[in-house]
Image: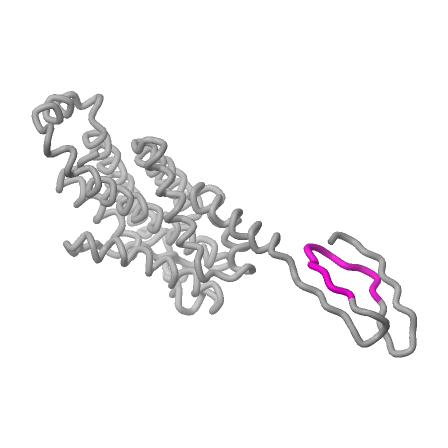
Amino acid sequence: MDIASSAIGLLNFAIECFNHIQLAREFEQEFSTYQLKLDVLQVRLSRWGEVLRNTNHSNSGSQAGDSRTTRHKESDDDADPAAKAHHILSEIQDTILSAQRHARRVETRLGAADKKLLDPELYVPADLKKIRIRFRECVRRWKAKAGKVIEATKWAFYQRVSFEKFVTDMSSLVSDLENLFPEDVRQKLSELSKEECNGISKSNLEELKDIVEECDPWLETAVDEMLQSRLSAGTYITQSHNTGMVTGIHRGDINGVSNGNNNKTRNYWGRH
């Protein structure tokens, strides 16, 4: 699937806009959850762009040898993935601009206290910042290859209902973009999602799982698989000093274990 430069501009605009979205006092109690949802949507968009770039690069040689056939096929917008992608990216832009306008209308009705904007550096716990750092690295990978710098305006969400609608709408539109890829290409979305989980601790993956549930099915699956792989690895157990040696792999809970000098040892196993 080839995509015109104007559509790439729309994609870059959407990705950059997430760097300029702020959250107000309404989100203070669960700030990390809401901020990370924005981060997840941003990295999901950049993932789509990364797969698109790689797909276009790998197909460029074969497309060049049959340009007349390609032009003929792309003249039919209904059958042209590039035209569909441009249309969806335009909808994404419209969704962002509409959310901006609505936020500004809400802002005019608020008092000074409710307009207070929250700083992620202060409201995201140190351990969860590691997730944000990892996602920023993934987004920078796309931006470095995209080249052109896009300017965007800072704006804020003041209401949860508006935020949740925005996340739902954006997630649906990005799903439409992803579905333009054939099945074998969509597998690359899965591979990149797994890479994005690298370096994230088990406890943070468990928190991330709840956050991505409604905004990134690819990352949700990757998180599940990563947690399962760490669980199945088990914990090696070696016990000595008393009578004999016990060696095994623990994969669950062990309850009622009693050990002591000159005492008998009783083991009541839970899961193992």
Residue 145 falls left or right of residue 119: left
Please identify the quadrant where the N terminus is shown.
top left
Span shown in magenta: 246-257
Question: Is residue 249 one of those drawn in magenta?
Answer: yes
Q: Residue at x 20, y 26 (%)?
A: 80
Residue with the most extreme front position:
244
Residue at the outermost right position? 263
Q: Nearer the viewer, residue 178 or 123?
A: 178
The image quarter in which residue 77 lies = top left
Q: Residue at x 85, y 61 (%)?
A: 267
Residue 93 against residue 259 in the figure, above or below? above
Verify whether residue 165 appears in magenta: no
Is residue 63 shown to the viewer in this render? Answer: yes
Q: Position of residue 264 (x, y in %)?
A: 92, 70
Q: Is residue 2 left or right of residue 49?
A: left
Q: Position of residue 72 (x, y in %)?
A: 11, 21
